[in-house]
Amino acid sequence: MFSNFGCSNQEEVTETPEKTEVEMKEAAEGWVKGTVTNDYANEGCDFLIQLDVTDASLGLIHPSVLDKKFQKNGMRVKFQFQRTRMPQPDECNQGILVILNAIEKI
């Protein structure tokens, strides 16, 4: 006799967690989340921020100034920004050039 104890043919269902009150408040205040990356260094870009999938309408953010304490590949951050009319630097054509109004490590 064979037993199927511990076996299941049912697929595991995962639910997408709802945003917490804090996340909803931060989103309303213009905070977005992303990951600092230097994956584009060979294209002349020092550090960019790759937005999370949920905030990926802009994709890559190119901060006009990024404090050295945030210049760590893979660092998770949340930040507020504004677009700028400054010209894109000649050495880096990736991302949307922005001014960071606030940034925090998460």
Image (cartoon, rainbow, N blue to C red):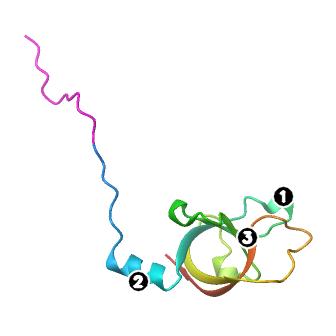
For image coordinates 10% across by 19% down, the residue present is 3
Tell me which segment is drawn in magenta: 1-12
Return the disc, 1 or 3, that comes first in the chain's sequence: 1
Q: In the rendered image, which residue does mark 1 sit on?
A: 42
Gap in angstroms between the C-alphas marked 3 and 2: 28 Å
Q: Quadrant of residue 55?
A: bottom right
Q: Residues within 10 Å of mark 3 (few under 14, many from 20)?
A: many
- Secondary structure state at the residue bearing disc 1: helix
Using the numbered discs, state the Cα–Cα distance from disc 1 to disc 3 in whole angstroms.
11 Å
- Given the image, on which type of amino acid does mark 1 rest? Asn
Please give the residue where the numbered disc 2 appears in the rendered image: 25
Alpha-carbon span between mark 1 and mark 2: 37 Å
- Depicted 98 relative to depicted 43: above or below: below
| Callout 2 crowding tier (Cα within 10 Å): few <14, some 14–19, many ≥20 | few
Q: Which of the 4 quarters of the picture holds residue 4?
A: top left
Horizontal side of residue 51 vs 41, given as left or right: left
At x 72%, y 80%, the residue is 98
Secondary structure type for disc 3: loop
**Residue 72 image offset from top left, x and y in percent:** 65, 70
Is 50 rendered above or below residue 13?
A: below
| Residue that extends furthest to the top in the rendered view of this protein | 1
Q: Is residue 2 magenta?
A: yes
Q: Which residue is mark 3?
A: 47
Q: Could you tell me residue 15's position as x and y percent?
A: 30, 53
Kind of residue sitting beneath label 3? Phe
